[in-house]
Amino acid sequence: MGDLAGIFKAYDIRGVVPDQLDEGAAAAIGAAFARVTGAGTVVTMHDMRTSSGPLADAFGRGAASQGADVIAGGLGSTDMIYYASGDLGIPGAMITASHNPARYNGIKLCRAGAKPIGIQTGLLEIKDLTERGIDPAPVPGTVTPRDLLPGYADHLRKLVDISSVRPLTVVVDAGNGMAGHTVPKVFEGLPVTLIPLYFELDGTFPNHEANPIDPVNLVDLQRAVTEYRADIGLAFDGDADRCFVVDEHGELVSPSVITALIATRELAREPGAAVIYNLITSRAVPEIISENGGVPVRSRVGHSFIKATMAEHNAVFGGEHSGHFYFRDFWFADSGMLAALHTLAALGEQPLPLSQLLARYSRYAASGEINSDVADQAASTEQVRQAFADRPGVSTDELDGLTVSTGPWWFNLRPSNTEPLLRLNVEAEDAATMAAVRDEVLGVVRDNTDHSG
């Protein structure tokens, strides 16, 4: 069995195959998952990595050994497991390492209704049971293959109907990930001329990493949008739960802008609803939520915090600056495809090009996320706190790392959970102010340390 202690993370299971995660480990985790959830039936899906199918089969065998019946959904995106778990009312397991390099794989777990399982909500129990081992049930469950893609596509198209919008030319970069499997079915019959990039499922990622948060992985999409004079470009990560948008000029659209756009659409449908945003999202987002009659609710970074906050406030929608978008109508889970459909609907329901449509949602200058290698995260953060503590009009909070704000600008400095890094995000009313604040904070953080951009 692989290295169990090293692969159980805060929100999921992830490690190098087969050194840390192998079929024996997957089967043991599947058995523990069935026992902890107490489920009579579970559903599994997997991404396109060469190790994913065998790991999913092993996980299913483990769950069946505890008497649980297994619906083997086969190839799918992570938001497909949320659809299956929500629609069928059963726990689910997705075998994927998302955007990680090809040698990695992992398992994302949820309870019935797509409720997340993290280290504080069952994952620690699953780890403990996996390590101890569990005797099989007297009667094993069955494993039944089922194609869940048609139901998933129909469900999304009922939530956002773009069948009658103006015709759109859309470039989609799937990065050889699962969007190459899901996009053709979801877009089938819609008024969309689809220009596919890297739709061949290939877990070795031969063209570029399936990680659109890194600008280098968007270059091909940006080029294709301008070359084909497309209306919009969409980029998905490896398991297709995140979506990034490029406008008709090939310019990247901030996920904060997409959050504001979708929030406006959802609040038009349900006035007065709560909308969640995380604390590195643009200040424009809570402003726009309020202007449209909604209740903005600030959250820590991370899907487990967003989902919990959404459930607490019965929020209609939530957005993260990392390209994750969450919907109450989708069991409070995230779906990059649903965010894409909302964006296409907003674009196709009016005549303006995307850049003009979105101009009113972009109000401030932002640094983007800047990582710095530090020897002592807490000490560096404290130095920054002291540097800004006595300035007039400055306020601080520690919801997630250190946030320092004043009228014209704000910044957040928070530690990575997995690496010796501090992550900085700065936003200001103009680019010059943003640059000045950014450089001052980095000057403190990187004093006498090595750094990376």
Image (tube, grey):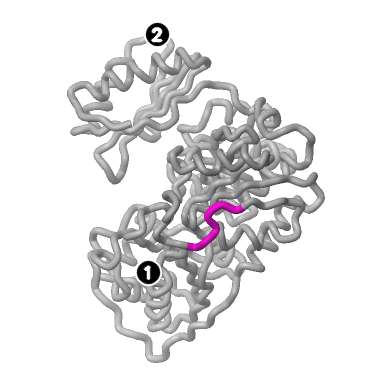
- Identify which residue, 196 or 423, lies in the foreground: 196
- Identify which residue, 337 or 263, lies in the foreground: 337
Query: Can residue 23 be seen from the camera position used here?
Result: yes
For numbered disc 2, what is the local secondary structure? Answer: loop
Circle nearer the viewer, 2 or 1: 1
Q: Quadrant of the N terminus?
A: bottom left
Residue located 39% across and 59% down the image: 204
- What residue type is disc 1 on? Ser
- Marks 1 and 2: in contact by CB < 8 Å? no
**Residue 125 image point, x, y percent:** 32, 65
| Mark 2 neighbour density, 10 Å: few (under 14) some (14–19) many (20 or more) | few
Would you say residue 316 sits in the magenta stretch?
no
Query: With respect to residue 175, does 73 lie above or below?
Result: below
- For label 1, the residue is 51
Q: Is residue 121 left or right of residue 135?
A: right
Can you tell which quarter of the image residue 392 is in?
Answer: top left
Residue located 24% across and 31% down the image: 378
Query: Which portion, as a residue range, is magenta?
Result: 196-201
Query: With respect to residue 441, does 186 lie above or below?
Result: below
- Identify which residue, 259 or 88, lies in the foreground: 259
Per the model, the C-alpha gap separating discs 2 and 1 is: 56 Å
Query: Can residue 304 be seen from the camera position used here?
Result: no
For numbered disc 1, what is the local secondary structure? Answer: loop
- For label 2, the residue is 392
